[in-house]
Image (spheres, rainbow, N blue to C red):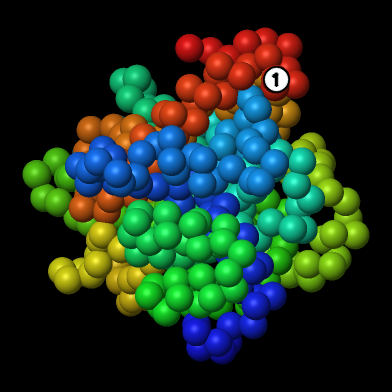
């Protein structure tokens, strides 16, 4: 990988496109975190920045517009209770629903053109509380702050080739994401991807002890790398077709949920910085995806995978992205609900 300031123009352009559609986690500004001031970021400005040149796809999510629903269960093994008093960590089986998706504003994008894949998930506890999350497959986020992400969107939209060079020089953390985008293997299945919740949260245990954590869903399916060209040959919508067929023939697919516990001093407000591999890890359960359903009128269609919807025992940390994403998600939902007639489905968006 060349130094950030010397990236070839073609490579910079492709990485900009990747970063601009980074999984709901990327579409952020600090509105609910209290950063908003006159003339600065608003939900409307961020959503406008995410829109492609031809405008948004009406009735669809403003980012991660291409996706497919799933239902299943979360099987908690009981290990999580040492970290959090949340009911979903008590040994048992809890209903889960979610959405596999691609990090793009285009619901008709060709699978092989989108580097970032995501998973939105909702787990329901017996007491009625919900835990919602949005995860993506890169192990680090592209930038360190919501403002930097907004700057990235602005820079990527400029015709001046120097704009991205200037941005990368000012935000050198971008190179870690760029390295992943260039070197990480492609797969031909949503089932073979790891999904990372890059934001930090605080788990509170039954004794009141607090633990800063991040979590990931690690696939139990065998990972078989392929090339981008091979994926393109399999068709524009292969990933949705493959996961539905895989579950129909091979049965439910599983991911192990692993929580990583921070040491004192580990950065909790910066998702572009990975914690050391030596940090304590606790396997807290297994996500079992049992059924795939088309998004049109599917159970995930009207769910906002808002990362601030949390059960007791889990709260946000000083990481500004979850609160920021929550505000953007809310505005995005309002827009697509108002545009329900433009979405190819039989029903109407729920309030």
Q: How many marks?
A: 1
139 or 290, which is in the foreground? 139
Q: If the image is split into quadrants, where does the N terminus sit? A: bottom right
Query: Is residue 119 left or right of 291 when viewed as pictured?
Result: left
**Residue 197 in sight here:** yes
Q: Report the residue at 54% width, 46% height from top.
A: 50
The x, y position of residue 173, in whole percent, is: 40, 74
Residue that label 1 marks: 342
Q: Report the residue at 58% width, 34% height from top.
A: 61
- Work out whether 281 lies above or below 128: below
- Identify the image quadrant of residue 251: top right
189 or 340, which is in the foreground? 340
- Identify the image quadrant of residue 277: bottom left
Query: Is residue 126 left or right of 287 when viewed as pictured?
Result: left
315 or 164, which is in the foreground? 164
The x, y position of residue 332, in whole percent, is: 49, 31
Q: Report the residue at 79% width, 50% height from top.
A: 110
Q: Say what secondary structure mark 1 lies in.
A: helix
């Amino acid at each position: 990988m060349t130094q950030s300031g010397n990236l070839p123009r073609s490579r910079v352009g492709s990485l900009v496109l990747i970063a601009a559609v980074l999984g709901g986690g990327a579409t952020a500004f600090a509105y609910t975190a209290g950063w908003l001031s006159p003339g600065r970021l608003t939900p409307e400005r961020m959503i406008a920045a995410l829109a492609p040149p031809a405008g948004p796809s009406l009735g669809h999510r403003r980012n991660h517009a291409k996706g497919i629903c799933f239902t299943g269960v979360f099987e908690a093994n009981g290990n999580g209770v040492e970290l959090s008093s949340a009911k979903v960590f008590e040994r048992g089986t809890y209903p889960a629903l979610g959405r596999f998706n691609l990090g793009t504003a285009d619901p008709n994008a060709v699978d092989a053109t989108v580097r970032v894949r995501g998973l939105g998930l909702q787990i329901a506890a017996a007491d009625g509380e919900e835990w919602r999350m949005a995860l993506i497959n890169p192990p680090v986020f592209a930038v360190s702050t919501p403002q930097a992400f907004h700057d990235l969107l602005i820079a990527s939209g400029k015709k001046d080739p120097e704009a991205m060079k200037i941005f990368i020089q000012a935000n050198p953390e971008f190179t870690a994401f760029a390295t992943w985008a260039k070197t990480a293997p492609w797969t031909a299945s949503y089932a073979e991807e790891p999904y990372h919740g890059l934001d930090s949260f605080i788990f509170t245990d039954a004794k009141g002890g607090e633990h800063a954590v991040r979590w990931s869903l690690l696939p139990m399916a065998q990972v078989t790398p392929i090339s981008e060209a091979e994926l393109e040959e399999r068709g524009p919508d292969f990933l949705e077709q493959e996961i539905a067929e895989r579950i129909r023939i091979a049965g439910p697919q599983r991911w192990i949920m692993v929580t990583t516990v921070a040491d004192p001093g580990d950065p909790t407000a910066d998702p572009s910085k990975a914690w050391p591999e030596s940090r304590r890890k606790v396997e807290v359960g297994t996500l079992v995806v049992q059924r795939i359903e088309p998004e049109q009128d599917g159970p995930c269609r009207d769910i906002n995978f808002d990362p601030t919807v949390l059960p007791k025992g889990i709260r946000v940390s000083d990481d500004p992205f979850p609160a920021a994403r929550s505000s953007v998600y809310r505005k995005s939902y309002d827009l697509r609900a108002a545009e329900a007639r433009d979405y190819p489905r039989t029903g109407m968006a729920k309030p």
